[in-house]
Image (cartoon, grey):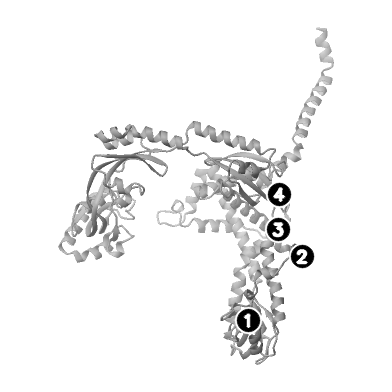
């Protein structure tokens, strides 16, 4: 009792102690996890112009986009699609806020009406958009959070689209061309000049005669830093261990399949024996085929196996097979027919027709009687009545096709009847009035029943491959990767310049996990890791890391070196030029004087030399009879003499050219504005940490 009294007396003290203990527990947890700020940062997938993109919200949008893409896009492609939308929205939102652009409710409602006008869900009995129908739809989906959120997103996107269009239209209103610019455009297209010229082509000097140093390449990069920026990248190399069947696995499967030869030979119900009793990997195909349709490696033999006999086991691609020749007959390999398709309500081919099946049959029989009496009416009737829009305007002509290409009933009618025969056949598409036009190339066809077993790696083989992979991985920890691979005759495949958001590894396909590993801060150059990949394993080594920034000489060399070689060749060729006339210059350099007429600035192509805007531009700056200094062009060094200049006659007004230039500039606004806003934006992209 005394103890309880003491506890009551000190209750406030105990509460404080417990509170401090709980606080210290929470604080310790925050410290371990980097604090509340760190937790928030961990859930931020990017920051654009100071606006944070929440990871959960971004993931929801990716999931929604993924549903729309279906199987047409990979996960990373979907992520990039949503990312571009987010960037676009944020950079434009900043402009809308700064300029005070708003989209009113009336404007959004108008856009909704326009966007949903052709959707039957929102139309009344007259086929006209009905606002009440839209309100009913919204009310019906409020209980479905996913559907309602999609509707809200759709409305928001319409509003954003309206704002963006208003913003872009404002910019377009300030973009245009003056009459003077229209006149310039006219002159560039219609002022012409005739020239004589001598070309000293760059190809006249071999690349091996010109040396370019790393220092010169570095100097060029330093002078043009904007052109040679590189994203962060990684180099790696890997050995692929394919999980594939061994020869032992194949031999064992051959022995197992061989046990079924007698059963296949004596089976009374071939289809049931193949599909059910033996569970063949390939189902029974109850049709006659020609020699060209049989497996190429055994076609000659299998085609001539007697009826009732079994051939095999034999290998065909990834299968071990045995085949029984069930029947053979003479059959045409090329058939030609025309048809008129009569559909009825309820079929996929029905369109707007309301006729019943019985009415369709009556119509088909009636049309058959007409064409039997007068074949020339077939074309007209096909155009008027056929539900097959792919050929009704061609008189129902289906062209030539092989046996088995059409649905069974249609195919059987043509195969089993003669050229000129007509009849009505029912299929899942409707009633076909068929006329057989032609049959060609009669030859032997065989019906074959085949049991197929897929060649697969056994458990023993799978374990052996895994062990081999693990041994190699361990061996490379403290030894040279390439040397160890060479010792075991493994193929090492290099992969260079992989970007942080890359998805595919050449030779391995989609392997996002490998890229993520290569870009982890803790992954060091030289580190090795094994990855499970499609059809096996990959042992991967990181060989190099490159940070974002100016390209290194070795990386930029491929693009910079040809530029510097051309510059040096130009100087070498210019020094070779001597003579006061084109004829002297040509003679001294074993070249000929060439001519080009009617050159203009809009399409500066010189006959015999190619596209040379600098050369044509220089020619327009010369007077008739004047000879130019050496001009460095795209394909060589030129000396030009103007023989004739013909200015355009001019127009009373250049309004049409001005309008054309204005339209061209306005058309470029959408792309250029977004690119400019994106380039100016401050973007911290952390997508690679999550995807």
User: Which type of secondary structure does the marked residue at label 2 adopt?
Assistant: helix
Label 4 or label 1, whichever lies nearer to me, is 1
Q: Hey, which quadrant is residue 310 in on the image?
A: top left
The mark lying in front, picked from 4 and 3, is 3
Q: Earlier in the sequence, mark 4 or mark 1?
A: 1
Q: Of helix, strand and loop, which one carries label 4? A: strand
| Residue 395, disc | none
Q: Which residue is mark 1?
A: 199
- Estimate the spatial distance between the alpha carbons at disc 4 and disc 3, rounded to whole Å: 14 Å
Q: Which residue is mark 3?
A: 554
Counting residues from the N terminus, which is met first, the one under dot 4 or under dot 2?
A: 2
The reply to whether callout 4 and callout 3 are in contact (CB within 8 Å) is no
User: Is 601 left or right of 346, judged from the image as shown?
Assistant: right
Q: Residues within 10 Å of mark 1 (few under 14, many from 20)?
A: many
Distance, label 1 to label 2, CA atoms, is 30 Å
Residue position marked by numbered label 4 in the rendering: 545
Image side of residue 253 versus residue 35, left or right:
left
Residue shown at the point (63%, 76%) measured from the top left: 204
* Side (left or right) of 615 relative to 462: right
Q: Is residue 7 above or below residue 557?
A: above
Q: Nearer the viewer, residue 574 or 552?
A: 574
Residue carrying label 2: 219
Q: Which residue occupies 41% across, 33% down?
A: 252
Q: Is residue 453 visible?
A: yes
Q: Earlier in the sequence, mark 2 or mark 3?
A: 2
Indicate the quadrant where residue 528 lies.
top right
Q: Is residue 650 above or below residue 48?
A: below
Image coordinates of residue 355 in percent, x first then y, are 27, 53
Q: CA–CA distance between discs 2 and 3? A: 13 Å
Q: Position of residue 343 (x, y in %)?
A: 28, 53
Nearest-to-viewer mark from 1 and 2: 1
Is mark 2 in CB contact (under 8 Å) with mark 3?
Answer: no
């Amino acid at each position: 009792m005394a103890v309880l009294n003491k506890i009551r007396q000190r209750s406030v003290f105990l509460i404080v102690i417990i509170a401090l203990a709980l606080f210290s527990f929470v604080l310790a947890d925050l410290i371990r996890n980097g604090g509340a700020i760190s937790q928030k940062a961990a859930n931020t997938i990017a920051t654009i112009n100071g606006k944070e993109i929440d990871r959960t919200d971004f993931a929801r949008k990716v999931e929604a986009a993924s549903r729309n893409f279906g199987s047409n896009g990979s996960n990373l492609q979907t992520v990039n699609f949503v990312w571009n939308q987010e960037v676009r929205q944020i950079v434009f939102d900043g402009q809308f806020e700064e300029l005070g652009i708003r989209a009113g409710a009336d404007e959004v409602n108008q856009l909704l009406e326009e966007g949903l006008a052709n959707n039957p869900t929102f139309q009344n009995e007259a086929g006209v958009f009905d606002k009440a129908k839209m309100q009913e739809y919204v009310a019906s989906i409020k209980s479905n959070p996913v559907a309602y959120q999609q509707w809200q997103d759709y409305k928001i996107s319409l509003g954003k689209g309206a704002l963006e269009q208003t913003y872009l239209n404002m910019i377009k209103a300030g973009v245009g061309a003056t009459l003077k610019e229209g006149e310039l455009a006219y002159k560039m297209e219609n002022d012409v000049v005739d020239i004589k010229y001598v070309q000293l082509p760059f190809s006249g000097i071999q690349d091996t005669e010109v040396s370019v140093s790393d220092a010169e390449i570095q100097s060029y990069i330093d002078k043009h830093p904007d052109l040679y920026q590189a994203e962060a990248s990684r180099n790696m190399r890997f050995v692929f261990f394919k999980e594939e069947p061994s020869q032992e696995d194949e031999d064992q499967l051959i022995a197992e399949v061989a046990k079924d030869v007698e059963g296949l030979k004596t089976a009374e119900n071939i289809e049931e024996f193949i599909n059910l009793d033996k569970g063949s990997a390939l189902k029974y195909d109850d049709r006659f085929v020609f020699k060209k349709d049989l497996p190429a490696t055994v076609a000659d033999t299998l085609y001539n196996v007697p009826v009732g006999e079994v051939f095999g086991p034999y290998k065909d691609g990834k299968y071990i097979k045995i085949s029984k020749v069930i029947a053979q007959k003479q059959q045409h390999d090329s058939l030609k027919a025309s048809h008129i398709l009569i559909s009825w309500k309820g079929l996929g081919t029905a369109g707007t027709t309301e006729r019943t099946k019985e009415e369709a049959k009556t119509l088909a029989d009636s049309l058959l009687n007409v064409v039997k009496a007068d074949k020339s009416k077939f074309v007209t009737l096909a155009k008027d009545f056929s539900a097959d829009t792919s050929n009704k305007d061609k008189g129902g002509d289906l062209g030539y096709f092989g046996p088995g290409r059409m649905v069974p009933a249609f195919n059987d009618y043509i195969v089993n009847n003669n050229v000129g025969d007509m009849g009505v056949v029912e299929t899942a598409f409707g009633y076909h009035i068929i006329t057989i036009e032609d049959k060609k190339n009669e030859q032997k066809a065989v019906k074959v029943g085949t049991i197929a077993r897929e060649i697969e790696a056994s458990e023993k083989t799978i374990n052996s491959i895994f062990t081999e992979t693990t041994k190699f991985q361990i061996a490379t920890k403290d030894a040279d990767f390439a040397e160890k691979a060479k010792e075991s005759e493994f193929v090492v495949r290099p992969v260079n310049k992989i970007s942080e958001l890359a998805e595919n590894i050449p030779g391995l396909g989609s392997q996002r996990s490998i890229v993520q590993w290569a870009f982890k801060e803790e992954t060091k150059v030289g580190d090795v890791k094994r990855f499970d990949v499609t059809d096996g394993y990959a042992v991967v080594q990181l060989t190099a890391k490159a940070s974002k920034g100016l390209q290194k000489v070795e990386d930029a060399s491929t693009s910079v070196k040809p530029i510097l070689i051309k510059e040096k060749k130009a100087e070498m060729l210019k020094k070779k030029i001597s003579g006061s006339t084109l004829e002297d210059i040509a003679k001294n350099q074993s070249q000929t004087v060439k001519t080009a007429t009617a050159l203009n600035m809009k399409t500066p192509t010189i006959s015999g030399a190619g596209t040379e805007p600098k050369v044509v531009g220089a020619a327009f700056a010369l007077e008739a009879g004047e000879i130019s200094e050496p001009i460095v062009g795209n394909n060589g060094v030129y000396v030009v003499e103007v023989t004739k200049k013909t200015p355009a006659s001019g127009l009373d007004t250049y309004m049409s050219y001005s309008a054309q230039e204005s339209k061209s500039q306005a058309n470029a606004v959408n792309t250029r504005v977004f690119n400019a806003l994106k380039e100016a934006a401050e973007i911290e992209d952390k997508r690679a940490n999550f995807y």
